[in-house]
Amino acid sequence: MLELQNQIDSLKSDQAVMRGSFEQFLKDLSEVQVKQKDVLQTVDSRLSKFEPIKVTLDGLEFQADPAEKNQFDGALTVFRTGDFAAAQNSLSAFLLKYPSSGFAPSALFWLGNAQYATKDYKESIANFRKLLSIAPQHARAPEAMLAISNNWVELKDLKAAKKAMEDLVKLHPASEAAQTAKQRLTRFK
C-alpha cells in the first residue's frame, strides 16, 4: 500500500512538472504569435507603400501607385496655390513620368488651364485637344472644349472660337459648359 502511495505521489509530481512545462510552452507560443503578428503588420505596412491603390477622380475609377498619386496631388496643390508656371512644370513632369496614367486626362486638363493662365494659348489648346482625343467622354471634356474656345478668343481667332463653342453645344448639350457656350454664341451673331 505504501509502495502504491509512493507511486501515486511520484505520478502526481511528474504530472505537475508536465503541467508546468505545458503552461510554459503555451506562454512561449503566445509570445511567438504576438511577435509574428507584429512582424506581419510591419511588412504589410511597408509593402502597402508600393501596392497600387484604388482611386476615383472625375468620375473615373482606376488603380494607381501611391507615388503616382502623390506626384499628381503635389502638382495639383502647386496649381491651386496660383503658381501656374510651377504648376506647368509639375504637371508636365507628371505626364512624362506617367503618360498612360489614369490621372493623365485630369493632368492634361489642369496643364491646359495653367498654360492659359500664363498666356501660352497654343500649348493650352494642344493639351486640351490631347485630353479630348484620349478621353472624349471625360467629365471635364465639356470644360476643355470651352477652354479651347477661350484660348481662340485670346488669340483673336473668333471663327475658331465660334466653331469650338458650336462643337461643344453639339457634343455635350446638357453640360453647364454648353449653356455658357450658347450664351456666348448669341453674342457672336
Image: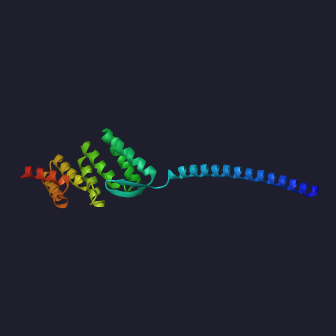
Q: Position of residue 38 (x, y in %)?
A: 60, 49
In the displayed structure, would residue 67 be above or below residue 135? above
Relative placement, left or right, of 12 versus 145 is right
Colour convention: rainbow
Residue drawn at (16%, 48%), measured in percent from left and top? 153
Residue drawn at (33%, 45%), measured in percent from left and top? 88
Q: Position of residue 145 (x, y in %)?
A: 21, 54
Residue 90 in view here? yes
Relative placement, left or right, of 122 versus 180 is right
Residue drawn at (37%, 56%), measured in percent from left and top? 102
Q: Position of residue 36 (x, y in %)?
A: 63, 52
The answer to which of 71 and 5 lies nearer the viewer is: 5
Q: Residue furthest front?
A: 1
Q: Position of residue 143 (x, y in %)?
A: 23, 52
Relative placement, left or right, of 147 versus 21 is left
The answer to which of 98 and 55 lies nearer the viewer is: 55
The answer to which of 126 and 143 lies nearer the viewer is: 143
Tell me the quadrant of the picture where the N terminus can be found. Answer: bottom right
Residue 100 in view here? no
